[in-house]
Image (cartoon, rainbow, N blue to C red):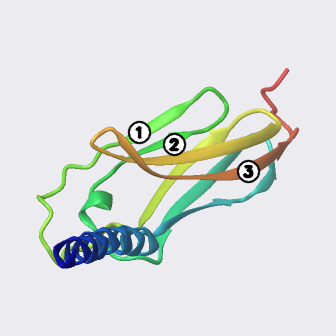
Amino acid sequence: MRTMILTALVVGALAGVGTSAEKSEKAKKPRLDLRAAPRMAFSPVNVLLTAELTGGEDVESLYCPEVEWDWDDGGRSVRESDCAPWAPGGSLERRFTAQHAFLGAGTYRVKVTMRKANHTVAVATATVDVRPGFGDMSN
């Protein structure tokens, strides 16, 4: 009886350690924010987008990601980095920028996706409102 109680306590303690470690890792994960400048303009317009990791700790799973931009106008851009191997205590690149020309009027939901080893690690979106302007290329 005493052995069964001791075994149950040890198993329960080990299960609790794994759970709190997983929660701790999730709590420390940075958040990806996306900003557009300008957010509203007349076409045609060049928009600068900035994706930024905020908060959290620098962890290997976010080091040297592939960054894909989906412009919501049929275009996509992908940036792949050539980075040195991860070293404990290393730091992450936390800001990613891209510029895109929107030629026609519309409301575009731009999406940025960070991937590491073909796994999505973070996604963010921003809306760009483009009104018809002189030289508008939309129908």
| Residue 58 against residue 38 in the figure, above or below | below
Q: Please tell me how crowded label 1 is: few (under 14), some (14-19), or many (20+) other residues with Cα within 10 Å.
A: few
Residue under circle 2? Answer: 69
- The residue depicted at 37 percent of the width and 75 percent of the height is 20
Q: Secondary structure at mark 2?
A: strand
Could you give the CA–CA distance between mark 3 and mark 2, rounded to whole angstroms?
13 Å
- The residue depicted at 85 percent of the width and 20 percent of the height is 139
Residue under circle 3? Answer: 127
Q: Please tell me how crowded label 3 is: few (under 14), some (14-19), or many (20+) other residues with Cα within 10 Å.
A: some
Kind of residue at disc 2: Trp
Q: Please tell me how crowded label 2 is: few (under 14), some (14-19), or many (20+) other residues with Cα within 10 Å.
A: many
Mark 1 vs 2: CB contact within 8 A: yes
Kind of residue at disc 1: Val
Q: Secondary structure at mark 1?
A: strand
Residue under circle 1? Answer: 78
Residue 119 quadrant: top left
Return the x and y of residue 15 as percentages of the image width and height.
Answer: 31, 68
Return the x and y of residue 43 as percentages of the image width and height.
Answer: 79, 41
The first of marks 1 and 3 along the sequence is: 1
Closer to the camera, 16 or 42?
16
Return the x and y of residue 59 as percentages of the image width and height.
Answer: 28, 68
- The residue depicted at 78 percent of the width and 27 percent of the height is 137
